[in-house]
Amino acid sequence: MSGEPFVGRARVNEASREGRDLELDADVVVVGSGAGGAVVAALLAEAGRRVIVLEEGPNVSVDEIQSMRPSQHMRRAWRDGGMTVAVGVGDTPTINVTMGRAVGGSSILTGGVCFRTPEHVLSTWEERLGLPQFSPAKLDAYFSEVERAIHVEEVPVEMRSRSTQLFAEGAEKLGYAIEPLRRNTMGCNGCGRCNFGCPHGAKLSVDMTYLPRATAAGAELWSDCLVERVLVEGGRAVGVEGTILTRPRGLAGKLGFGRAPKLRVRAKQVVIAAGSYHSPLLLERSGVGRASGQVGRNMTLHPAFRMFARFEVRVEGWRGALQSAYSRALESDGITMVGLFVPPGVLAATMPGFGTEHVRRAADVPHLAVFGGLIHDEGGGTVRRGPGREPIVTYRMAPADRARIPQIIRTMAEVFFAAGAKEVFPPILGQPGVGPDELRTLDLERIPALRLECSSQHPLGSCRMGRRPDDSVVDVDGQAWDVRGLYVADGSIVPTSLGVNPQLTIMALATRIAHGLRERPLP
Amino acid sequence: MSLFDRDARAFAEALFAGPEGPPPDERLRWLVADLADFLEQSGPRAWAVITGGLEVATWLAPPLIGKLPPLSRLSVEERCRALDKLEHSPAGLPLLAVKAILCILYYEHPDSLAEIGVTKPGESAPGCLVELRRPAASSGGAA
Ligand SMILES: Cc1cc2nc3c(=O)[nH]c(=O)nc-3n(C[C@H](O)[C@H](O)[C@H](O)COP(=O)(O)OP(=O)(O)OC[C@H]3O[C@@H](n4cnc5c(N)ncnc54)[C@H](O)[C@@H]3O)c2cc1C
Ligand code: SF4
């Protein structure tokens, strides 16, 4: 590809409307239509392969997004309405891990932030994990290909919200460099709505780019298809089966009885791209990767903490790009600070107190600035099968990561105070705003994990790739060690935490896997 | 009124009660219906998290101020005190989920946004909310 990206709308077959069992046949079946799956689907379809993409979630079009409140987007396109968690084990907060469940996957929820994998991370992969295939020079072509396809551009300084400007002013006073972010946008007007789907089609998530390319090249994209098992015959993947997510009609459907239509796709190659929570679940259900003992382990999250700061002036942080600047001043401490903003209701939600206390605080919303900090974590997450369709995920924070939480909170608070904030609201449950003196007296090192508010948007690594079958789930080409023709191509294969937002890394790795598959003859 | 409606309303009345008392009945009815719609669409885990959090608030908060549950039996001021205590206790986390989702919904209502000064009377909602047609009373997710 060269020049302008291919932007359009994908043709989506809504399986729930069919009301019948589906039996399909393809060269390649891709499970999951998010950042990883969409890339593989487009590149293989363009190479002439007959591709079928199966997505559990619904199709949410730009037209629909235009008439949705943020919470309506959450109930339709976010998994569990945004309430998925990783349960903290030991001295670890329970973490709200958000992800998409729709055509386009989590890609449609992003703030559009794009980072290449930092060089020091790739050095670790090379030196510690023995993966020289992923040096910056060797990945450069894949990154460039993705950046062109999703139009990665720098956010102009004029688009910064007042919230971000204030943080930048404080950071400058304290000597922390603030740099512009790059985002995958074209014609963005800075409405700040990105996490709830872009109503203007300006965020070039995979539903606007790779998936339309895939269907234009002949791929079939099916929504509402929950894949439950990979079919394996003679050590080779030969397809998948699952359930179509629709309520059976009539009284039986209303009462929750009746048989949901089934789905079966025969294929010569199977690519799993269901994300870091669900790819390991699917492998485990299919009995794949057991010998390694690594399926569902090693998950990293980038645990993230927000800081709100109240200023005397009106900040109206919702005006301007949602995410426009970041700081890597604390990179050597394993911390990245990234600008963000959230709608007024979400801001009000974390204000302490009830009744008049809450209402008084909520009236401060127009005066609040926000910034976030994430930890370049060592891992500690485990995905296990739960009683129903969803996994049970736990996370035990490494002591070094736990020790970074007070540093994140203090640094972001000090930056806001340097910018003139009257008080800050640390991410501690029920904690009222504190001024500079009170902040110094807060014993942040001893705040119990249960009282910390922590979130994550970046689960990674639960089916990590590696050099040996005894310490990884897939090889460097994304192929499962123990089942031929079965590939994983999503965030779950990323072998370590990145310390930066991961979509570009995931898409570059998926591009590399797709190039490999294109060159390999079909069985 | 179902038990869920009763408990959600008791919580919301306390959370959003200003100096003049709880928000208007029409807005509370819309909020509770919208919450039910949210949970129906978001799936069983969201339902479990929120109803679990509501149960904790309904039954555990009143004893913290020496009162008998459920929360709805208490005056609005008592409910605020009880919930505040619960928020500072180790059981504060489930409470946060309920509070968060109620706030997200409540502050999508044009009148709530105007009350906290995000919009001025007659002004349309900021772009990050995009669309905020006045919801019909008790119309669930309608907007
Ligand atoms: C709110 C939010 C903001 C973010 N912002 C940024 C950002 O600004 N920059 C950035 O780099 N990253 C961001 N991310 C992270 C980024 O979106 C993800 O890392 C990336 O999309 C993950 O890609 P993936 O292919 O692994 O999974 P996903 O994109 O999540 O796709 C997985 C898909 O598989 C489907 N699926 C799961 N199980 C099944 C099954 N059994 N059968 C069929 N389908 C299934 C899911 O429904 C989903 O659609 C953000 C994430 C969130 C949630
Ligand atoms: S700021 Fe608005 S226009 Fe720009 S990408 Fe985000 S949602 Fe789209």
Image (cartoon, coloured by chain):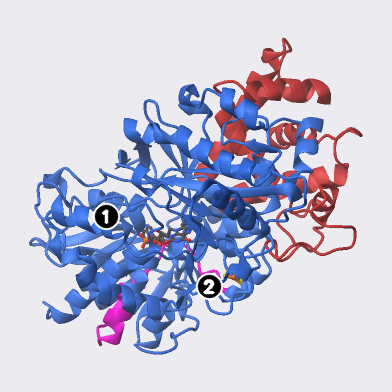
Q: Nearer the viewer, residue A443 or A79?
A: A443
Q: In the image, residue B73 lies at what x, y percent?
A: 79, 21
Q: Do discs 2 and 1 share a chain?
A: yes
**Disc 1 chain ID:** A
Q: Is residue A60 magenta?
A: yes
Above or below for A293 versus A12: above
- In space, the residues marked 2 and 1 are separated at their CA atoms by 27 Å
The reply to whether dot 2 and dot 1 touch (C-beta < 8 Å) is: no
Q: Is residue A460 shown above or below A381?
A: below
Q: Which residue is mark 1?
A: A121
Chain B in the picture: what colour?
A: red
Subunit bearing disc 2: A
Q: Is residue A184 magenta?
A: no
Task: Judge left or right: residue A401 versus residue B98.
Answer: left
Q: Residues within 10 Å of mark 2 (few under 14, many from 20)?
A: many
Q: Is residue A229 visible?
A: yes
In the rendered view, would you say B49 is above or below A233?
A: above
Quarter location, residue A297: top left
Chain A as rendered: colour: blue
Asked if the beta carbon under badge 2 is closer than 8 A to the nearest atom of ligand 2, the reply is yes
Q: Nearer the viewer, residue A441 or A115?
A: A441
Q: Residue at x 66, y 54 (%)?
A: A343
Magenta stretch in the rendered image: A40-61
Q: How many marks?
A: 2
